Image (tube, helix red, strand yellow):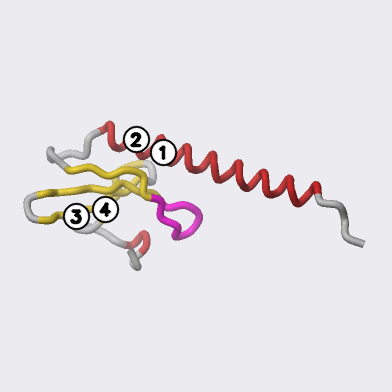
């Protein structure tokens, strides 16, 4: 995805609240992978499915949002743990 967040239809489509879908079609199968951007151009894929209806199912969008929230919480916890480790190190002489 060299185009980053400028990739548009028919390859990618913004859904809502920072969630995007990557659109693929192979033969008669239409697949979607939902993703979001995290700090700059880092792309985090959350879930994928074979599309059966015209609209993206609400359950898939909600799952992507829940996984984004979980990812961000874990990233912040790691960042906070790293900061604590730096602060707790004894000063070098």
Image-based side of 60 in relation to 54, left or right: right
Q: Report the number of numbered marks.
A: 4
Q: What secondary structure prevails in the magenta region?
A: strand
Tag 1 or tag 4, which sits nearer the N-term?
4
Secondary structure at badge 4 equals: strand
Sequence order check: which comes first, mark 2 or mark 4?
4
Q: Kindly state the secondary structure of the residue where label 3 is placed.
A: strand
On the image, which quarter does residue 80 sit in? top right
Q: Which mark is residue 24?
A: 3
Marks 3 and 4: CB-CB under 8 Å?
yes
Kind of element beneath mark 2: helix
Give me the C-alpha separation between circle 2 and circle 1.
Answer: 6 Å
Indicate the quadrant where residue 75 lies: top right
Residue position for label 4: 22
- CA distance for labels 2 and 4: 15 Å
Horizontally, residue 77 falls left or right of residue 84, namely left
Q: Is residue 57 left or right of residue 35?
A: left
Of the residues under marks 1 and 3, which one precedes in the sequence? 3
Mark 4 crowd level (few <14, some 14–19, many ≥20, 10 Å Cα): many
Which residue is drawn at the image coordinates 35% and 45% (left, top)?
19
| Distance from the alpha carbon under mark 1 to that under mark 3 | 21 Å
Per the image, the residue denoted by label 2 is: 63
Residue 87's mark?
none
Q: Residues within 10 Å of mark 1 (few under 14, many from 20)?
A: some
Q: Is residue 21 magenta?
A: no
In the depicted structure, whether residue 6 falls above or below residue 88: below
Pointers 2 and 1 in contact (CB under 8 A)?
yes
Magenta segment range? Answer: 37-44
Circle 1 — which element?
helix
Across and down, in percent, residue 61 comes to 31, 37
Choose top left, top right, bottom left or bottom right for residue 57: top left
Distance (Cα) linking label 3 and label 4: 7 Å
């Amino acid at each position: 995805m060299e185009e980053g967040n400028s990739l548009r239809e028919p390859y990618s489509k913004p859904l809502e609240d920072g969630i995007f879908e990557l659109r693929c079609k192979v033969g008669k199968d239409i697949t979607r992978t939902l993703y979001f951007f995290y700090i700059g151009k880092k792309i985090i894929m959350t879930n994928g499915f074979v599309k059966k209806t015209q609209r993206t199912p609400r359950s898939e969008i909600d799952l992507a949002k829940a996984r984004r929230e979980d990812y961000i919480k874990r990233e912040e916890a790691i960042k906070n743990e790293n900061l604590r480790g730096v602060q707790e190190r004894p000063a070098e002489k």
